Image: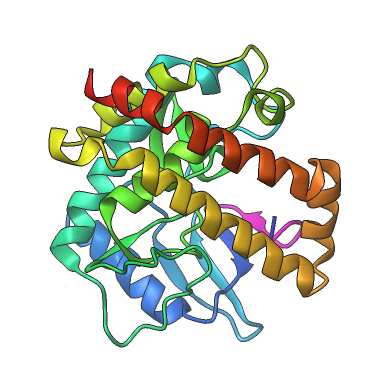
Amino acid sequence: MANAGAVFRRGALVERPAPRHAPGLHAHLLALKEHGFDAAPTPVGLTAGGREQLTFVPGDVALPPFPGWVLTTTALESVGRLLRRLHEASEDIGAGTDVEWPQDLADPAGGTMVCHNDVCPENVVFRDGRAAALIDFDLAAPGRPLWDLAMTARYWVPMLDPLSAAPLYPGGPDVSARLRILADGYGLPPGERAGLPGVIEQATETCRAFVTRRVADGDPVYLQALAERGGWKRWDRMQAWLAAHRETFTVALLD
């Protein structure tokens, strides 16, 4: 949403607006590759005009309204596995103390590894129906692995009340079952499963605060999106639904 109309492919490269912390982020992406995570764009450089160049990652990316393959069990499991691979590499690297990581969607509890924080369908590249790479690391920041999994669950399960989910995910997905599939695909340890629903609620609060700031700043993209998706009533409904079903989700994760 933030870079709509400003991203261009030029052959084997993608050129897009560079985030303020681009040098530190580029160093992290290169470190990920050195630690065996080859499922992300490789930074090529920065231009004089405040843009960045990265390698193009071939594959399919889902855009709303999402195609049916987005909701397959295979797709969901593969997203969990890909996120786990990212976290294993990120844990080996750690979080650079000299990088001013963006706090927009960052884990309020902090952490010693860099999370992606925005693993939505639009930021996952698929090949043959399976998640193959992650793109758009602009909002990456230090946090807990469980936080990144919670953020991912919001989009991929999705953790939305039925009314909110209907326009993007037709067919009424079984939220409890899909949350379990994502956790299993990720390999979430038993001792961390009971805490995931609560962290999803925290992540939702952080996302709402993020949208609130963008709307208060008069960002036309977020103003339009808020109006088209039901306004703040949708956020109220979604958060109340998450709280009301917390025990159901916990049982599904532990059963």
Residue 61 occupies quadrant: top right
Residue at the top extreme of this rendering: 171
Q: Position of residue 205 (x, y in %)?
A: 54, 55
Residue occupying image coordinates x 47% and y 15%: 72
| 223 is higher (above) or lower (below) than 195 | below
Q: Nearer the viewer, residue 210 or 129?
A: 210
Q: Nearer the viewer, residue 207 or 195?
A: 195
Q: Position of residue 208 (x, y in %)?
A: 62, 56
Q: Magenta stretch mostly in which secondary structure? A: loop
Residue occupying image coordinates x 62% and y 81%: 50
Q: Nearer the viewer, residue 244 or 120?
A: 244
Q: Is residue 34 left or right of residue 241?
A: left
Residue 213 visible, this orientation:
yes
- For the record, the magenta segment spans 3-13
Q: How many marks?
A: 0
In the image, is residue 210 part of the stretch drawn in magenta? Answer: no
Residue 5 occupies quadrant: bottom right
Q: Position of residue 224 (x, y in %)?
A: 85, 53
The quadrant in which the C terminus is found is top left
| 87 is higher (above) or lower (below) than 238 | below
Residue 229 occupies quadrant: top right
Q: Position of residue 183 (x, y in %)?
A: 29, 30
Residue occupying image coordinates x 76% and y 44%: 233
Residue 13 visible, this orientation:
no
Residue occupying image coordinates x 50% and y 65%: 138
The quadrant in which the N terminus is found is bottom right
Q: How is the image coloured?
A: rainbow
